[in-house]
Image (spheres, helix red, strand yellow):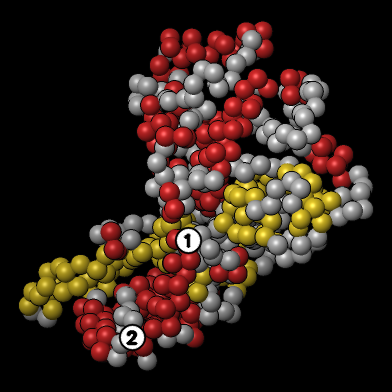
Amino acid sequence: MIEIKMPRLSDTMEEGAISTWHKRPGDTVAVGDVLVEIETDKAVMEYEAYQGGTLAEILVPEGQNADIGAPIALLDDGTGGPATAAAAASAPSHSPERAQPTAPAPADSAPVAEPSAAGASPANGTANGAANGAARQIASPLVRKLARENHLDLSHVTGSGPGGRIIRTDLSDLLAAGHVATPQSAPTQSPAAVPPAASAAPAAASADPGSATPETDDVRGTRGVPISQVRRVIARRLSASARDIPHFYVTAVADAQALMDLRATLNAQLTEAGRTKVSVNDLLIRACALALREHPDVNVSYGGDTSSIMLVHDRVNVGVAVAAESGLIVPVIRDADTKTVTQLGAEAKKLVALAAERKLTPAQTSGGTFTISNLGMYGVEHFTAIINPPESAILAVGATTREPTVVGDTLEPRYRLRYTLSVDHRVIDGALAAKFLQTLTNLVEHPWMIIA
């Protein structure tokens, strides 16, 4: 018996969530078969079997998390072994009711689904199992998890996903209205089985609306929305960055009229040649890469308070912050200083599309040395960004807007661009940050240097 363990699928991954099992207990597994889809902090990735056999047991069901290295399933390779006992010891403990032996099912009956962690009793397990079985074909793993935990009836829910698949947004009305399954299928518990603290909680919440949990806060009209694995990791890493890294901010304003004129000329010629247009962001990626090459001391990482070295990166790998549906993702363009603007644009578009589909590989989201976060397309003129560890700098780019500008002795409407550099003050001083922005501004105002 072989333990299938939660793999490390990204450099920042600490735990993974089971998205979809492609095999069920009793299925034959060949080497190379896709066993399971795992949601990491950056993407949903397929995990293939490295050994063949028969899937004996699923230890972590869809919708639940497991730490790296924790057993998630058992594979019977025909050799037997103590893996079952080891996995049982590492699995979450069950309640006394679930530990009681049950009468064996008839030989010709279908296996009954185990009650969910939300706590379904044996009496209603069959009803819930049937409901979940019906939903399994048309609902996402997260929807099935929410349906189990909130006892939702999915039989009348119309899915808005591909092929009529029920997705999380389709449950918004049900969750907000507090609709649950019928009393016959709802879990029941004897009063003696309910802990005193749990039975007293509703009364306390009614007496003090301010103490109600977000899931039951009717005063504020609050509803609970599950947080994705990606969002949880983002929250943890950015909290650590804001807390541990002494941020220092430097803002500059560039006259972007020449940049916008150059872009218009380039795009007219590219369109005529049947090629893809370039964006302002593509030009800025190239400009930042050139500025980093000129100021290598900005392209660094801090080794930590216990380290005596600073890591200077010879390769310029620029991360591009992407606002995906699941959260902020930063795919990385490697060796950006060696690529043309059109190459950078094509690669950036490809990475953004993969980020939206959650199909980025670990190699496409790791190895960054500098990040650009651009909110200009939303009309934001100026903002500051939090550094993306282990990098030491990030550039926050605002919108390119036309403003009255003094040119010689006249006032003209010209494009202006604001950007703010956030740096780790432990390794980058203010003067160095200012010199980097000075170089970047010179490139923006003389854009032929960007494409030369």
Q: Is residue 286 above or below residue 9?
A: below
Q: Nearer the viewer, residue 232 or 269?
A: 269
Upstream in sequence: badge 1 or badge 2: 2
Q: Amino acid at mark 2?
A: Arg
Residue 19 percent location from the top left of the image: 59, 49
Please, is residue 237 above or below residue 177 in the view? below
Mark 1 is surrounded, within 10 Å at the Cα level, by few (under 14), some (14 to 19) or many (20 or more) other residues, namely some
Q: In the image, is 35 to the left or to the right of 340?
A: right
CB within 8 Å, label 1 to label 2: no
Toward the viewer: 355 or 378? 355
User: Which disc number belongs to residue 275?
Assistant: 2
Callout 1, which amino acid?
Glu
For residue 127, side relative to residue 338 (left or right): right
Q: Quadrant of residue 186?
A: top right
Residue in the foreground of this view, choosing between 354 and 163: 163
- Residue 436 appearing in the image: no
The answer to whether residue 37 of the structure is visible from this angle is yes
Q: Position of residue 104 (x, y in %)?
A: 80, 27
Tell me the tag on residue 357.
1
Q: Residue at x 53, y 80 (%)?
A: 335
In the structure shown, which secondary structural element does the residue marked by tag 2 occupy?
A: loop
Identify the residue at the far left of this view. 410
Q: Which mark is residue 287?
A: none
Mark 1, secondary structure of its residue: helix
